Amino acid sequence: MKAKLWLALAVVWVGLASLCTFGLVNAHSSLMDERLRTLDAVTEAAVHIAEEYQSKVAKHEISEPDAKKAVLAHWDLLRYSKTGYVYAATLDNTLLLNPGKPAMVGTNTTAVTDAKGHQPYVELSRLAKDKGMGHVRSWDKDPKGGLKEKISAVRLIPQWDWYVATRIYVDDINQAFQTTLITTLAFAGTSGVLATLVMVFIIINIQRSLGGEPTYAMEVANRIADGDLSVEVVLKPGDQRSMLYAMARMRDSLADVIYRILQSAESVTTGASQIAAGNLDLASRTEFAASALEQTAASMTELTTAVEQTAGNAQEASRLATEASGFALEGSKAVEQVVTAMAGIEEASGRIGAIVETIDAIAFQTNILSLNAAVEAARAGEQGRGFAVVASEVRALAQRSATSAKEIKSLIETSVERVKSGSIHVAQAGKTMTDIVQGVNRVTGIMTDIAAASSEQSNGIAQTNSAIAQMDEATVQNAALVEESAAAASALNEQAQLLRTTVSEFRVS
């Protein structure tokens, strides 16, 4: 990886150098082309002036010699930049105009050479004859002993066998090119250094992100992809953020998952075998349950008949209990009437006792009065003897009355005691009759409940019969489902074996 990254850095440097070279060459060519366009524009303007006067000559507005003088005068006035001017000569190199060297006007310039021994005027004349226009390079010596390059542009004036030319020094272009070269090299060097620093940073960051060489990471990834989860990923100390660390975690997670899948496959295989065995046992149990359900259905039919009879008997018993309750209620009412009559007798006996006590009191007072009468008769002597006899009889009657009253009182008390005893027994009989009525009512309610419960039981047993029939049908369906479950368990076992075979292709430590 390092070699590739450094190669990429070298490519960056080569690219920068190529870009700078191309830019510098292009810049120099652009500057030179700009100067040449300037020279061509000046010579073209000079040609236009000559063509204008040639047109006047053709129209006989001016003579040809005057036209030539006028053209040279106009050319002498043409200036551009600080040192630019136009010069002209005939095709045999007789100089017609040279504002920079007026002393040479009228001389032949064929033998004139530049600092390198070239004949610039001869080359200008030849170029004008052959192509009508073009550029010629020549060199002059500068005061310091060096050479100054200049470029001349020439155009042909065919009607007069002249050529007009102008020249410009290009040393300023070279100086500008050198300045541009220095600036470009400085920029390229700075850019290269920055690119190098960035590339070094990227290299370090990539190595840190990868956690090692890409070839090693690729090898680990290929081994994991091939199912080898036992590969040990070598990490740098403290590395918890690199791709290799992530691959190590992935390897561990995959190994754990595969291990658990293997365990699950084993469990599924065991479970499928157990399910198959359970299905066989369930099939036999289902057959036994179907037979038991048939017997239960027959028993439930008999039970339904018995419960229906019980329900009928319970309804009859409820009817009889209702009648007994009516009879007991009538007896209770009769006892209540007897209790009421006994209470009246007890009350009348009490009133008779009071009357007897009054008679006894009257007899007692009569006895006292008879005693008093006897005493008074005794005091009266002979005259009161008859009154004494009467008093004695009255006393005897009073005593008998008192005795009879006591006997009557004793009889009445005895009757009252017996009436009280009878009232108590009658009250107890009334309470007993009330209890009997309540008991009969409870029995009636219970019998009614029994009848209702028997009816509900009959309905429930009918529903149970229906449920048993459904259970019988469900048992048959269960038997079919057991067979399907056995087939599914077999298929599950095959899938578990296939899963275990597939997962076993992974190698875990």
Image: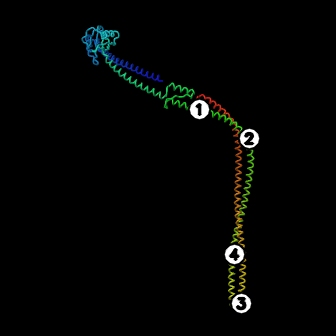
Going from N to C along the chain, the mark reached first, 1 or 3, is 1
| Cα distance in 3D space between marks 2 and 4 | 89 Å
| Cα distance in 3D space between marks 1 and 3 | 152 Å
Closer to the camera in the image, 443 or 34: 443
Residue 115 in view of the camera: yes
Closer to the camera in the image, 350 or 43: 350
Q: Is mark 4 on a helix, strand or loop?
A: helix
Between marks 4 and 1 in the image, the one whose residue lies nearer the viewer? 1
Residue identifier under label 3: 385
Q: What element carries label 2?
A: helix
Residue identifier under label 2: 291
| Cα distance in 3D space between marks 4 and 3 | 38 Å
> Is 400 situated left or right of 118 in this image?
right
> Is 60 situated left or right of 27 in this image?
left
Residue identifier under label 4: 353
Check contact, mark 3 vs mark 2: CB within 8 A.
no
**Residue 259: assigned label:** 1
Q: Which amino acid does label 3 sit on?
A: Arg
Going from N to C along the chain, the mark reached first, 3 or 2, is 2
Q: What residue type is labelled 4?
A: Gly
> With respect to residue 481, does 226 lie above or below?
above
Going from N to C along the chain, the mark reached first, 2 or 4, is 2
Residue 55 in view of the camera: no
Residue that extends furthest to the left in the rendered view of this protein = 103
Going from N to C along the chain, the mark reached first, 4 or 3, is 4
Going from N to C along the chain, the mark reached first, 2 or 1, is 1
